[in-house]
Amino acid sequence: MSFRRGSLCLAAALLVSTIGGASRAGESGPLSVGDAILVAEPQAGSQRAPAIAALKAGEYLVVWQEGWAGLNGKSLIRGAVVKDGKPGAAFAISPAEGVREVPVVAFAAAGGKALVVWQELVGGKQFDVKAVLVSADGKPAGESFPVAATPHNEGRPAVASDGKDFLVTWEAFTEDQQNYAPFGARVSAEGKLLDGAPVKLAESGYLTTAAFNGQDYVVAFNKGLGLRARRVSRDGKLFDDGDNGTKLPGLMSIGPAVAADGREVMVAATGTPGPDPWGWGGPGSIVAARVIRDGTCPEQKLPVKPGRDAVADREIPYVLDATAWKGRKGWPQGAPGGFRGTQNGMWPTTPLAIAWTGKAYLVVWPRVHLAGGHVLSTNYDLYACLVSPDPVKALGEPSAVAEAKEAETRPALASAAAGECLLAYELIQPDGRAVVALRRISVGQ
């Protein structure tokens, strides 16, 4: 496969398509998905883990890791400003030496700068969390600095902005080395840490993500096999301490993604990320739920029918996608003969991306093709649907937004103006390397 800057030759699979049903009164209309383009020519190894921040209408900052982070490998963080769907020249955000992974980014409009955060291997033994400010025209504004650097592992960062400053969250191995716990620290628009020490958000937890609801930050994270959410005020005060955070619906099990509409925060997550031979883990699903201003989750209190049959049959309003047992109704786990596949031959999985589009949320996630029974293939496609904020429900059936012969996974999503989104994702090439592809998505208003 050959690539040219600004284009991907992927034949008919990359033509503009329209997904979703006809628009209904008060709801967003269909999605128009644009051609896929390459964010930048790879310089070394793979491009992975894209993240996006909206700058202003039509403009975005896309960041990714590039290189090989394996044994004796090197990987750096690169970025590009995308204007009207066209990426500008790529630039280095971190030094080329060393191992730097999983970047995230948020933009503070008041200061006109974005904060790019990543995990960095230190001394070949542990990860620290580092960050650097980047101007809206794509120039690092100063040197990188440590956000979390202790003798224990810190990684998988997330970042959000209140429009002026930033909140960085991450997971860290606790001092007793028994488990991971979520932490957070505020960073000023000048790149200064605002708290004397990181704030511990819960006694245990991992996979943090954050958004600002117009009043407070909301941090969602995994705790055990469920999800929790905690509010953090602009001045660093913690709320929702009961059981280390607000419980989100039990159907949500891993990999939260969050977005805010200026008042509330929507959390989307995966139910069961993969099948097992007898279906004991339950159906694969994509689930969404809100955290409102007072820190509670209305969907957690809904009188809905619980159980795996209800998920598989899509009887729960806030279940956006779910697998149906091939040839059977409900989810007959442990049935004679075991699990032999789904009705559509695919399984919704993680990671997800979500953005507020002005009238509805847009959620994007991978579906992996089953190679037979419970066996997952290496072919992933990206699906999406619009989600109404109140009540939380899918506006139509999930539809493909990226489905080529190559695998597409790890989506990132941002919206710079009502009805406008930019999607970035990993596109796996035949030789196993990955490149970052972009697609513009327009939402009818």
Image: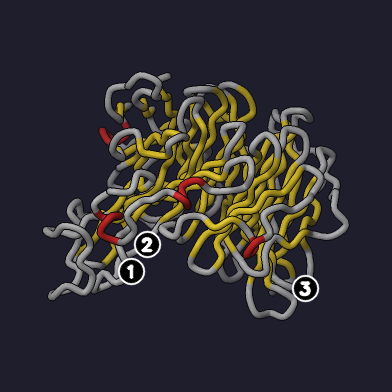
Between the residue at mark 2 and the residue at mark 1, the CA separation in whole angstroms equals 6 Å
Q: In this view, which residue lies farthest toward the front?
A: 303
Would you identify the image quadrant in which residue 214 lies? top right
Q: Residues within 10 Å of mark 1 (few under 14, many from 20)?
A: some
Q: Nearer the viewer, residue 80 or 136?
A: 136
Look at the image and tell me whether residue 92 can be seen: no
Residue 97, position as x, y percentages in the image: 70, 58
Residue placed under numbered mark 3 in the picture: 151
Residue 133, label in figure: none
Residue placed under numbered mark 1 in the picture: 281
Q: In this view, which residue lies farthest toward the right?
A: 196
Residue 272, label in figure: 2
Discs 2, 1 touching: Cβ within 8 Å: yes
Query: Which tag, 3 or 2, sits closer to the chain's start?
Result: 3
Q: Amino acid at mark 1?
A: Gly
Q: Amino acid at mark 2?
A: Thr
Residue 1, position as x, y percentages in the image: 34, 44
Query: Which tag, 2 or 1, sits closer to the chain's start?
Result: 2
Residue 309, position as x, y percentages in the image: 25, 59
Between the residue at mark 3 and the residue at mark 1, the CA separation in whole angstroms equals 37 Å
Query: Which tag, 3 or 1, sits closer to the chain's start?
Result: 3
Q: Amino acid at mark 3?
A: Pro
Q: Nearer the viewer, residue 153 or 216?
A: 216
Q: Which image quadrant: the C terminus?
A: top left
